[in-house]
Structures are given as structure tokens and as C-alpha cells.
Amino acid sequence: MQASAATQIIRLQKIRQPGLVLLALICGHALWKARSPTNHPTPSILRDTTSAVPVPCPELVPPSAPLDWMRWVADMGDTLPAPCTIVDTSSVRPKETLSGFLLRVGIDPLTTKEIAKILGKEPFSLKVGQKISYTLEHIGSQTHLRRLVIPVDFGKEIVVAQRGNGTYLLRKVSLPIVKTVRCVRGVLRTSFLADIIRCGAPKEIAKSISGAFGNLINFKRSLHPGDRFEILFDQVSTKGSMESKPGKLLYASIASNSGKVAVYRFPGKGGDSFYTANAENVQRSAFGLPIQGARKTSGFGRRTHPVSGRIHCHRGIDFSAPRGTPILASAEGVIEKVSSEHGYGRCVTIRHPGGYGTFYAHLSHFAKGIRPGMHVKRGQVIGNVGASGNATGSHLHYEVRLRGSPINPASIQSLSGNKLSGKDLRRFQELKRELDTSVKRIAL
Ligand SMILES: [Zn+2]
């Protein structure tokens, strides 16, 4: 049996007088039974450390709580035949300090003070429920702390061990970490988050997915039952223990009738970020789309005006969308103008940092409370699609301006420098190939 939260190991050392042992066992059992009418959990193992053969003895069962243990040992008094060593684990209780913990598990005040002093120099804090292991040795009525193991971080432990001369030594231990890559795929039924978890992805990974897609997908509006998703993530575990935790989301894709959107984690210059298959940084795109999932019907530049028939320069991009579709601020900024203009109908102008501005026209409604001077976040609804002003059908006319002049919104991405190039691009393409292969190869 291994020492763990639920198990206790007793070692009887240096047994010299078998007669006394038997007497102690009988007394101990009688005392224990008399004081503890409730069922004891798992039976422990008595082990004689002088020989390698374990000696199971279900009759001598120590109480599970350390304080009971202390009383039990005291009850036994000097009749206890030999030193007993227990390895136990206890969880930190609410508002408990390290000293409080040590005293509670039966460590004397003097040792507690010493341990607290040694650990006081370490920058760690106790968390409620954190499991701390300790090894106590009971000799007669005295209890000695031999070893204390505090997990401080995943795969990291602080070990305080007693040396031969009785003093304590602190060691920081890093357990070897093993990484495994896992893939989860499934079909969207009700809620994207719930569906991913249902298909086997850990909660932490599922939660990071909407952020990974950035503005590429509006999770509230663009997803539909039947859409298929694939997620690749790694899982880290400590070698030799059952402890494991989800690592990082590496890849995610959502495929629907209108196509597939995929994002890849890539360690760029500013740290890990998600990139589209075209090596564009999802998070650092300066301007998002003003409408989710809308069809671009008219691009920037020269074209024949759909109403007048004259050739002119189209100052923005048109997105065709049903009347009432929410229009989103494509970047964070301050509302500059909320107005009704002859050709553009109801329109909103937003001022953004760096001399940029965005303009949204032909709205059916303004969002409630939208007024000049108001701060808006990226993705915040500022109004709804309509056909006010000169418009052939319901659509959004969207412009991006730099110091007042319209620029091609498509060029914004290169302006904000969010596309990988050169060496980084080659590294990304290599990593993308690896991730694509992994997705094809691994299935849960
Ligand atoms: Zn237009």
C-alpha cells in the first residue's frame, strides 16, 4: 500500500520483546474500540521494517485524525513497544496558518516555531484544501516531525526533512513533467462550451477557446447545431504520480456550411498567440469585423454605384446582412458622431487611437444609450443593420479612416503588423504542418 491521502503506514521498529508487543496490541485495540465506536476507514498495514516482509495486522488500527492519534499514543503510554512512524496527509483548513496546521496535526510548539521560521523565508502561500504530507515518529509519549512535504506548485514541492542531528533542512524538489497531446472532436449540439466538455476536453481548455478565436467567430451568434469542432491540447503530468493537469490549447477549428475557421498556437516575439492558417495573429488584429459571419458584397475602391450607376470610388466595404443584425465596434474607441446623413442614413463614427476612425452607415437603429463621447469596447453593439439613406437592400457600409481619409480596411491587418513573415512565417508553417498531422492522427 502506498502512502497517500487515504492511507497510513505504521512501522514498528526495533521490536525486541514479542510478549510486550502482544500485550500492547491487545491493550491498544481495547482502548481504541472503547473510544471509537464508529467504523474506521481503510485498515492499515503494520510493517516490521526490520524484515522486508509486510505483516498485516488489522487489529491495530490507529485513528485517522492526527489528534486522536496523539491521544491514542498517550493512552498507550510507555507500554507502546517501539517507535511508530506514520505518514499522513491533511488538507489546509479555511483561515489556517502553517503554524496552525502543524499544531493541529500534532507537532509540538517548539518544532512548529522552528519549521515556521525555516519556511517563512519561502515565497509561498497556503491554499484552503491544499494537501500537506508529513511523517511523524512517535517514541513513547513524544512525537517527532521527520518530514514535511508541501506541494507549492504543479510538479514542485518544498520538503523539510530532519537530519541526524535533529535540525531541519529545506529542499525544493521539482518533479519531472511529462507532456501528452490530446485531441477532442465533436459536433455542436447545444452550447459550444458544454459540447466541448461533453466530448472530453477539460474545462480549462474549453474556456480558453473563445479567446483563442478572438474576433474571428462570434460565439453567441455564428455557431449552429451540426457545426463540427476539433481541439488539440496538451496535458502535463508529474512523472511517477497520478497528478496531471491540462496544459495549453494548441489548435482549435470550427467547420460549418460556410467553411472552416482554424487557429494555431504559435510562440511569436511577444509570447504565445493564436494565428489563423494564413499566419495572421488573431488577438493582435487591430480591427475586427463589424458584423459576424456577414457576406462582403462590395469591396474598397473603384466601382459602379448600385443606385446611381456612375463609376466612383467606394470608400469602404459593404457587408450584406439581414435587417436587425447587430453591428459591432470593430475596435476600442470613443463615439465621435451619432447622426443621420443624406446618403448614409443613420450612421455612427468612432474615433480610435493612432489617428484611426471607423464609420458605420445605413443603420436601422442605434444601440440604446449610444452618444458622442461614449467609450466603446471592441465587439460592443453600436446599432443594427438596416437600409436607411440611399441603399438598395439591408447592408452595412463600413469605412476605416486614417487621419480622416478612408483606407482599405483589408490593409489594416498589415498596418498593425500582425502577420508573420520571414523566419517566423517559416517556423509557423512548420508548426502548423505538425499540428495538422497530429489532429489527423490522434483521436480521443
Ligand atoms: Zn458602401
Image (tube, rainbow, N blue to C red):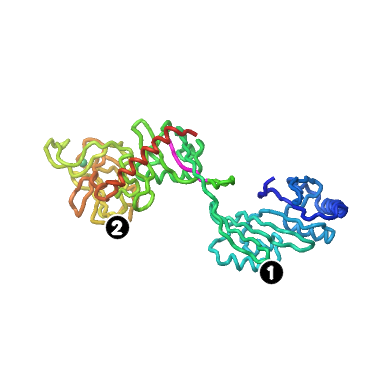
Magenta span main SS: strand
The amino acid type, in three-letter code, at marker 2 is Gly
Q: Secondary structure at mark 2?
A: loop
Give the quarter of the figure containing the N terminus: top right
Q: Above or below — where is 323 with respect to 99?
A: above
Give the mark toward the camera: 1 or 2.
1
Badge 2 crowding class, 10 Å Cα cut-off, few under 14, some 14 to 19, many 20 or more, is few
Residue 233 lies in magenta, yes or no? yes
Instruction: Choose between 138 and 65: the one closer to the eye.
Output: 138
Sequence-wise, which precedes: disc 1 or disc 2? 1
Residue 311 percent location from the top left of the image: 11, 38
**Would you call the spot at circle 1 few (<14 residues within 10 Å), some (14-19), or many (20 or more)?**
few
The label number, if any, that marks residue 373 in the structure image:
2
The quadrant where ligand 1 appears is: top left
**Most foreground residue, 139 or 273:** 139
> Is 385 positioned to the left or the right of 86 in the image?
left
Marks 1 and 2, Cα distance to the nearest angstrom?
64 Å
Give the image location of residue 363, x and y in percent: 27, 43
> Which three-letter amino acid code belongs to the residue tagged 1?
Leu
Query: Depth check: 275 or 322 in front?
Result: 275
- How many numbered markers are drawn? 2
- Residue 110: give its label: 1
Query: Does the beta carbon at disc 2 come under 8 Å from ligand 1?
Result: no
**In percent of the image, x 53 and y 49: which residue is there?**
176
Ligand 1 within 8 A of label 1's CB? no
Q: Secondary structure at mark 1?
A: helix
Is any atom of residue 34 visible in this view?
Answer: no
Q: Specify the segment rendered in magenta.
A: 230-236
Q: Quadrant of residue 101?
A: bottom right
